């Protein structure tokens, strides 16, 4: 292995990540025969095959899996070294790899905007996925930090809460339950319901609550996007439960309303988390501190409404225009 070059390892890592020689060649802007030659030389050095081709599908062998994990480790260490050297030169430079659940995209990009203004030398790789895919990314150690609201208990993580994430029942404004107070949760049984896809953290939280109170809703539609769900509600397809972060004041003035249902909001919290024992890069550490220090400035539905000179009444059914 000592004869392997860093370039060969980079080529191998790209092939392994894409499970494709063609895509690796495209990404690295080299020809496919060059990719094949590099992988072949690496295989000869190792004395064991790294890939096996079954039909059209490329699989990693056990040796390949081992080499991939080692490569990821080496590249991460090299990135960290670059950041350390930049820090020694008095600048913060490098890459922040951040994985967030889809619902967090309503506030994370804006926060990153402020962060990048302060640290212009930092590049961000932001992955937005649902809860289940984010957990997979954690297991594969793909990012520095993760933002989600229900950190898994079976992965050793270091997690810090930084913001509330209330989930509320949303209906179209002309729904008969709009304006009613303290609606029993059982009233939702039988209502046509729009649910997030399997693997969504929002869905997990709703399902837990409904299971606890033995409420069975009629799921009319499953959608993989909070925005699509809001359109579905406005289109009269049913009720749904969404994080308040997904709602903007204008929608509550117009087509949508929050229902005052017992046991809602579901009180979740946003956590920033990383694998326990992972040596955070200087950049990741800087962002973590920035997030914790600035979390109280993240706009909520209420503060955005106020900025636009609206007051949301306690029951959230109405917005009152302030003069
Ligand atoms: P989701 O996760 O975007 O997958 O629904 C949200 C959450 O973790 O609360």
Image: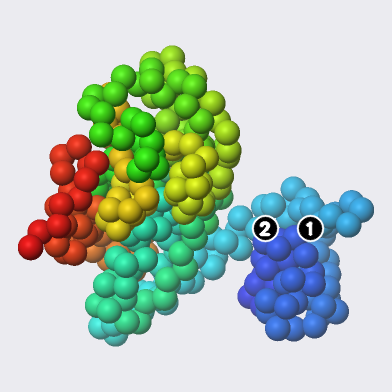
Residue furthest top as drawn: 214
Point out residue 99 in the picture as x, y percentages from the top left corner. Answer: 45, 56
Q: Quadrant of ligand 1?
A: top left
Whether 16 is drawn above or below 177: the answer is: below
**Residue holding disc 2:** 67
Nearer the observer, 90 or 228? 228
Q: Which mark is residue 184?
A: none
Contact (Cβ within 8 Å) of mark 1 with mark 2: yes
Q: Which mark is residue 50?
A: 1
- Going by the picture, which residue comes out furthest to the left? 323
Classify mark 1: helix, strand or loop: loop
Question: What is the C-alpha distance between the residues marked 1 and 2?
Answer: 8 Å
Residue in the picture at 65% in, 58% down: 68
Query: Does residue 218 appear left or right of residue 177 in this picture?
Result: right
Q: Where is residue 240, by image quadrant?
A: top left
- Give the image location of residue 37, x and y in percent: 83, 76
């Amino acid at each position: 292995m000592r004869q392997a070059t860093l370039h060969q390892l980079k080529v191998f890592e790209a092939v392994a990540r894409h499970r494709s020689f063609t895509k690796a060649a495209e990404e690295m802007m080299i020809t496919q025969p060059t990719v094949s030659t590099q992988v072949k030389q690496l295989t000869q050095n190792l004395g064991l095959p790294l890939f096996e081709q079954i039909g059209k599908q490329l699989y990693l062998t056990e040796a390949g899996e081992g080499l991939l994990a080692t490569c990821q480790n080496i590249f991460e260490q090299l990135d960290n070294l670059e950041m350390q050297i930049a820090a020694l030169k008095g600048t913060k430079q490098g890459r922040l790899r951040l994985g967030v659940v889809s619902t967090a995209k309503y506030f994370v990009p804006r926060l990153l905007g402020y962060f990048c203004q302060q640290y212009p030398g930092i590049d961000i790789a932001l992955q937005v996925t649902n809860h289940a895919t984010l957990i997979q990314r954690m297991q594969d150690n793909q990012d520095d930090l993760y933002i989600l609201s229900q950190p898994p208990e079976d992965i050793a993580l270091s997690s810090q809460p930084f913001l509330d994430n209330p989930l509320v029942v949303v209906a179209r404004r002309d729904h008969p339950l709009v304006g009613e107070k303290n609606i029993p949760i059982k009233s939702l049984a039988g209502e046509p319901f729009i649910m997030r896809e399997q693997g969504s953290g929002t869905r997990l939280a709703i399902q837990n609550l409904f299971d606890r109170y033995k409420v069975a809703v009629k799921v009319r539609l499953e959608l993989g996007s909070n925005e699509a769900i809001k359109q579905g509600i406005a289109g009269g397809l049913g009720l749904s439960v969404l994080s308040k972060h997904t709602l903007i004041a204008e929608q509550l003035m117009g087509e949508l309303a929050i229902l005052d249902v017992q046991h809602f909001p579901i009180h979740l919290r946003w956590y920033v988390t990383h694998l326990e024992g992972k040596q955070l890069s200087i950049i990741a550490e800087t962002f973590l501190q920035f997030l914790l220090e600035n979390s109280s400035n993240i706009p909520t539905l209420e503060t955005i409404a106020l900025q636009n000179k609206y007051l949301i009444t306690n029951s959230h059914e109405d917005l009152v225009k302030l003069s």
